[in-house]
Image (tube, rainbow, N blue to C red):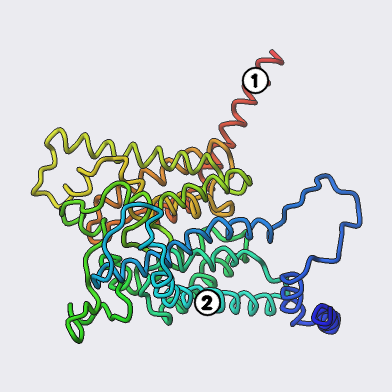
């Protein structure tokens, strides 16, 4: 009670000053606002921006926890301390040692993402004199889940500053940005520090990937093997079973490996009406169509085993859904309500093109065998155009019906 009263006193003390948004943000983060609507309202609902962001975070938490276990598992697997698992409830995967090693590496990423991002949000709120917006609550969680686990913290901090300032604040803040902020941050990292973002190596605890293969006493120091997309891009055989890929016992960015948990998160977002099922489903359809076309090309003999594109082209089209970051991007970032299409028909077009282009980039860019980031950013730019033509099409149809009735 004392803390609440002290915060309330500070809020009143700085009311009307430049620092008011900062204290208001702390107060509303800890407590419900004590204000209600004063006039008549047309719509009454329990949801607001803060609750919406919290629901998305709840959908992301299982991916975060699994990512910690998987990071530790990949480390112990590379050092030979444990054997490969295939069952989701395997005891050797869900042990404290895996969680501890993963948490030591991943939690600092989460901390840096939130601290740096929220500091920038507070600074802009004070400068512009508006309330601190809750939009970064989700972005701050997404960013650590879509970067390699061994990314240096200073690189992450620089990228977050760029993403928040250039990707969102210059457009007016939350609700005004044209690009997904989390993907803007990842795109900056990809182009500014490509050697760290290639994602073609498995992380090992306490290692520097630029050091040699073995450290002291013959213990693996950094490089233990390539990720699935990295090996397929070089036409190497697929060394993981379908169950391993679906459950997530594979190397990759923190939150993208477990298709099972991503699917459960998608159902949760659809049930709570936060995520668009039209975008998710159409993205999957687009990916399947593109993957199937590539399979037909391989079956027709147009692409042979000597081609550098053969590995990913010959992969069964439906397996594209359970490897790489496609599923995570389609569920958690393509459905961003600010940067996605707003019309129902536009969502089908928008999602389908994301899936279609994602697999196309994945196959034709062997140096960086992942395409969902670039596909979503590209469609973020075209989303307003898609909605414009959908609306114009509806207007023309209504005008035709109106002419028929008046004739």
Furthest residue to the bottom? Answer: 216
Residue highlighted by disc 2:
111
Depth check, front residue: 77 or 107? 77
Give the percent coordinates (x, y) of residue 269: 57, 48
- Which secondary structure, mark 1? helix
Extreme left residue here? Answer: 306
Work out whether residue 374 can be spotted: no
| Rendered-image quadrant of the C terminus | top right
Q: Is residue 369 visible?
A: yes
Residue 377 lies left or right of residue 315; in this view the side is right
Please identify the residue farthest to the front as the structure is shown.
91
Above/below status of 138 relative to 264? below
- Say if 15 sits above or below 348 in the image: below
**Residue that mark 1 sits on:** 401
Q: Position of residue 243 (x, y in %)?
A: 32, 48
* Residue at image point 47% right, 47% down: 263
Residue 294: percent from the left, percent from the top?
Answer: 24, 40
Please tell me whether residue 296 is drawn above or below residue 18 in the rendered image.
above
Q: Residue at x 81, y 66 (%)?
A: 33
């Amino acid at each position: 009670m004392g803390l609440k009263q002290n915060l309330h006193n500070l809020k009143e003390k700085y009311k009307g000053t430049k620092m008011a948004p900062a204290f208001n943000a702390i107060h509303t983060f800890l407590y419900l606002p004590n204000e209600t609507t004063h006039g008549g309202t047309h719509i009454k609902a329990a949801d607001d921006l803060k609750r919406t962001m919290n629901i998305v975070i709840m959908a992301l938490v299982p991916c975060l926890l699994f990512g910690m276990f998987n990071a530790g598992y990949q480390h112990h697997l590379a050092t030979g301390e444990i054997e490969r698992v295939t069952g989701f409830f395997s005891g050797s995967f869900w042990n404290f040692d895996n969680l501890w090693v993963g948490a030591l590496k991943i939690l600092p990423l989460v901390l840096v993402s939130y601290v740096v991002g929220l500091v920038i949000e507070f600074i802009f709120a004070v400068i512009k004199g508006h309330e601190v917006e809750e939009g970064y609550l989700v972005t701050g969680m997404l960013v650590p889940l879509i970067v390699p686990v061994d990314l240096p913290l200073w690189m992450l901090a620089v990228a977050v500053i760029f993403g928040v300032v250039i990707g969102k604040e210059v457009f007016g803040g939350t609700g005004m940005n044209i690009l997904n902020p989390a993907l803007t941050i990842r795109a900056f990292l990809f182009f500014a520090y490509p050697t760290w973002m290639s994602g073609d190596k498995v992380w090992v605890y306490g290692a520097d990937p630029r050091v040699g293969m073995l450290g002291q006493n013959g213990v693996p120091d950094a490089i233990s093997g390539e990720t699935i997309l990295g090996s397929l891009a070089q036409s190497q055989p697929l060394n993981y079973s379908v169950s391993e890929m679906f459950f997530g016992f594979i190397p990759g960015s923190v939150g993208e490996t477990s298709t099972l948990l991503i699917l459960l998160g998608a159902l949760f977002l659809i049930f709570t009406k936060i995520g668009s099922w039209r975008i998710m489903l159409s993205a999957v359809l687009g990916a399947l169509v593109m993957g199937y076309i590539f399979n037909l090309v391989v079956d027709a003999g147009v692409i042979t085993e000597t081609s550098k594109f053969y590995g990913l082209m010959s992969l069964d089209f439906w397996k594209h859904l359970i490897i790489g970051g496609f599923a995570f991007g389609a569920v958690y970032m393509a459905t961003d309500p600010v940067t996605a299409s707003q019309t129902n028909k536009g969502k089908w077009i928008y999602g389908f093109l994301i899936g279609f282009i994602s697999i196309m980039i994945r196959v034709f860019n062997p140096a960086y065998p992942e395409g969902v980031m670039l596909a979503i950013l590209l469609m973020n730019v075209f989303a307003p155009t898609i909605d414009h033509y959908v609306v114009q099409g509806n207007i023309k149809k209504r005008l035709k019906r109106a002419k028929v009735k008046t004739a």
